Amino acid sequence: MHEAAHLSSDQLRAVLEQASTSRYASIFELLARIGMRRGEALALRWTDVDFTDILLRVRGTLARVDGTLTVTAPKTTRSARFIPMSAEVESLLRQVKASQATERLQAGSVWTQTGFVFTTETGQPCDPRNALRALKAASARAGLPSTTLHTIRHSAATLMLVNGVPLKVVSDVLGHASVAITGDVYGHVSPDVSRTALAALSTALET
C-alpha cells in the first residue's frame, strides 16, 4: 500500500488561509480538524450533529452516481462511526448552521430543505467536484502542489500521529477497516513517532 501524500502543519494552515473566502472553507476546515473522508463530510446532515453530547455521526458518503449526487452506504463497517467534536469543530458547525439559516431566509421559496450541513445557496448538497476546484485554486495561491481533499484528510491523520495520538485512536477516528491499514498508509510517520517514544523511555529511565 502506498504511503499517503500529506502537508505539513504550516502548509495546511497556508492552504486553509487561502481558502478562507471560499464557499467551501468550512468543509476544508472540518476535514483538517477531524480527518473525515470527503464524501463523509458532504453527506453530513444536521441530524448527524449532536450538540448535546458533542459528537458527529458518520453514516454515509455523498457521491455522484449515474450523474446524480447520492448518499451511499459507508465505505466499510467501521466507517459508520461517532467522532467526538473538539471545541473548534463545534464552533465551526454552529457558525455553518447560523450562516445556513441566513441563506435560507434570503433564498425564500427557492430553498430546498435537504437537511445537509454543507449546501449550495439554495439548500442542495455540495458537489464534490466544485469543492475540489476551490481547494486546488487555494493550493495554487499558497504556492503548493495541487492539493486534493484526500490530502487534507491524510494531513490530519499524520499530524495526529506525529503529535502522539495512539495509532488505534487515529484508526478509529479515520474509520479504517483495521489498525493494520492505518499503519500501512501512515508508515512514513513511524520514525518520528518511534524517536519520540524512545526519547520518552530514556527520560523515564534517567529519572
Image (cartoon, grey):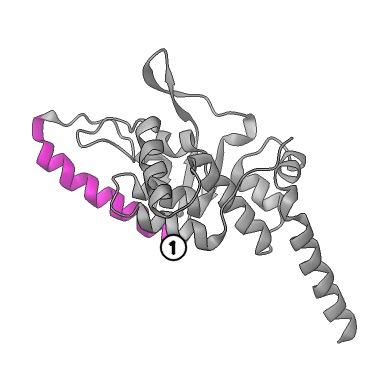
Q: Nearer the viewer, residue 120 or 137?
A: 137
Residue at 62% from the left image edge and 58% from the top image edge: 160
Residue at label 1? Answer: 87
Residue 134 showing in the rendered view? yes
Q: Which percent across, then down, holds residue 42? A: 41, 36
Q: Nearer the viewer, residue 72 or 141?
A: 141
Q: Quadrant of residue 151?
A: top right
Extreme right residue here?
Answer: 205
Residue at 41% from the left image edge and 12% from the top image edge: 66
Image check: 50 left or right of 188? left
Q: Is residue 113 above or below residue 86?
A: above
Q: Which amino acid lies under the numbered mark 1 shown in the image of this protein?
A: Ala
Residue at 41% from the left image edge and 48% from the top image edge: 140
Q: Is residue 203 above or below residue 145?
A: below
Residue at 42% from the left image edge and 33% from the top image edge: 43
Q: How many marks?
A: 1
As for residue 105 lying within the magenta part, the answer is: yes
Q: Quadrant of the C terminus?
A: bottom right
Q: Which percent across, then down, holds residue 13? A: 46, 60
Q: Which percent across, then down, holds residue 176? A: 66, 38
Dot 1 falls on a residue whose secondary structure is helix
Image check: 128 left or right of 186? left
What is the magenta range? 88-109
Q: Quadrant of residue 162?
A: bottom right
As for residue 79 lying within the magenta part, the answer is: no
Helix, strand or loop: magenta stretch:
helix
Extreme front residue here?
Answer: 143
